[in-house]
Every structure is written in C-alpha cells, then in structure tokens.
Image (cartoon, grey):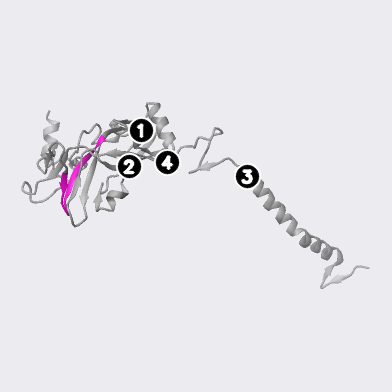
Amino acid sequence: MVLSFRGESTRGYISRCITVLSLPERVSDRRRQRSITTQAAPLRLCGRRADQGGRYARGVLLSDRDIRAEIAAGRLGVEPLLENLIQPSSIDVRLDRMFRVFDNSRYTHIDPAQRQDELTSLVEPGEGEPFVLHPGEFVLGSTLEVCTLPDDLAGRLEGKSSLGRLGLLTHSTAGFIDPGFSGHITLELSNVANLPITLWPGMKIGQLCLFRLSSPAEHPYGSAAAGSKYQGQRGPTPSRSYLNFPLPSDAVDAVESR
C-alpha cells in the first residue's frame, strides 16, 4: 500500500524531507569551500596579482622602499635629492628662488587663446630674503628639484598640510605629472589667508606621490604623439594654453608659405 500526504506519494515526501534536512550541511560545505578558495587565491591589488616575492603589482602608490629602488635603478630622477626628503609614500620637494608675478598693466584681460608673453615677469628675491605673497595674490613658482619620470610611473603633487593650515595653496589645478615628464614642476601659489605669507627659497613646499601604471604609456609625455608643451621646462614656466587653440587663418597661411 502506498500512503499519500496531501496528494504526494510516500517516496516523494520522504525524498523531499531528506533534501531539506541535508540543506544546512550542503550550505556549510559551500561556505567552507568558498573560504578555502578565498584563502588560496593570490593577493590582488587594483585588479593585478602580486608576485610570489611579495612585490606589489602595478597600479599602486609607491612606498618609500619602492621609491628608493626606482631611484637606485636610475629610472626615477629627483635632483638634487636629500635622503630625509623621502617620506613613507612620497618625496618632499622644495621651493626654488624664482617667481613669476602677473603684471596687470600690460593687458586688459587674460585670453587663453592668445600668446601673452608680457603677462608675467620673473622676480628673484634678494639673497637671504623671502618672497612675500599677499592675501588674494597668485604667482607661479617652481620646485628646486628637477623630476624625471619613466614611462610607467605617474606623479601627483600635493601641498604640505602645515602650509595649507596657514592659507597657502601650492597648486590650483595642475597637480598631475604624466609619465615621461622631465623638468622643474611649476607651482601655482595662492594666498587665501588674510595676512601676507613669506615664502623662503629652499623651504619644503609640497610632496610628490608616485603611482605605477597598469602598463607603460604607449606615448609618454615628451613624445611626438603626446603634443607635450612643458617637457624640459626650467623654473616657473608661464602658460602655453594658446597651443591648444587652432592657428588663425593668416598664421596658417604664413606657416604653409615657408
């Protein structure tokens, strides 16, 4: 005789009960297997594996030991460099003694599409004297160090916290440094405090962080295809934004006639 439970056969009912009773064990097995798989999986950072030697893969912020290794290998250049400038994950950079101040009497306005060579003038404070940056004033400065990056490292310049708390901004927008760049880093200095700030040549002005790319840049900064405007710059370099705009028709005719 075959019993029926609400229209279900005895065999079907017993089979269903066994399935339900064994479910927690199966779930536990799956969790255990997932845990084992996770523990056995290789370490991944930013989607890339770490090698067995423990060296992190590409796509990460360089530590002090990696910074020293890149400098020792001759791939990363920071000159002149003092050992105490290397921080846990950055390099402190210092202020050079040259500044570019804006001359408000030369032009009625600033036009990014025009070459305005007399918009700024170069200023150097006297020996042993600081440059005084007044409230609301904006000037260009530069790092004392010449920085050279390989094609698989990018940099980012950040301000110093101690100076930011005094109202000094180290850069307005241009904190990124492309792989392949070589030269002084131009600083965009502004005073948002309500008192003048003295800027001493040689003082620590910012910190350079370095990131390893997922792969070397195909066209690094300074290559012909990159259209770089500031490769090899020395000292505070004025804007060359006019190169981003097409030449006027008369200038094009002049170039083609050569």
Q: Is residue 137 magenta?
A: yes
> Would you identify the image quadrant in which residue 9 lies?
bottom right
Decide if residue 69 is on the left or right side of residue 137. right
Residue 83, which numbered label?
1
| Residue that carries the numbered disc 3 in the rendered image | 39
Q: Position of residue 139 (x, y in %)?
A: 17, 46
**Left or right relative to 248: residue 38:** right
Sequence-wise, the earlier of marks 3 and 4 is 3
Task: Report if the CB atoms under discs 1 and 4 are less than 8 Å apart.
Answer: no
Mark 3 or 2 closer to N-term?
3
Residue 61: mark in rendering: 4
Q: Mark 2 or mark 4, which is nearer the start of the sequence?
A: 4
Of tags 2 and 1, the one toward the viewer is: 1
Label 4 to label 2, Cα distance in Å?
Answer: 13 Å
Residue plotted at (25% across, 53% down) = 166
Q: Residue furthest front?
A: 128
Gap in angstroms between the C-alphas marked 3 and 2: 37 Å
Q: Nearer the viewer, mark 1 or mark 4?
A: 1
User: Up-down: is 195 above or below 76?
Assistant: below
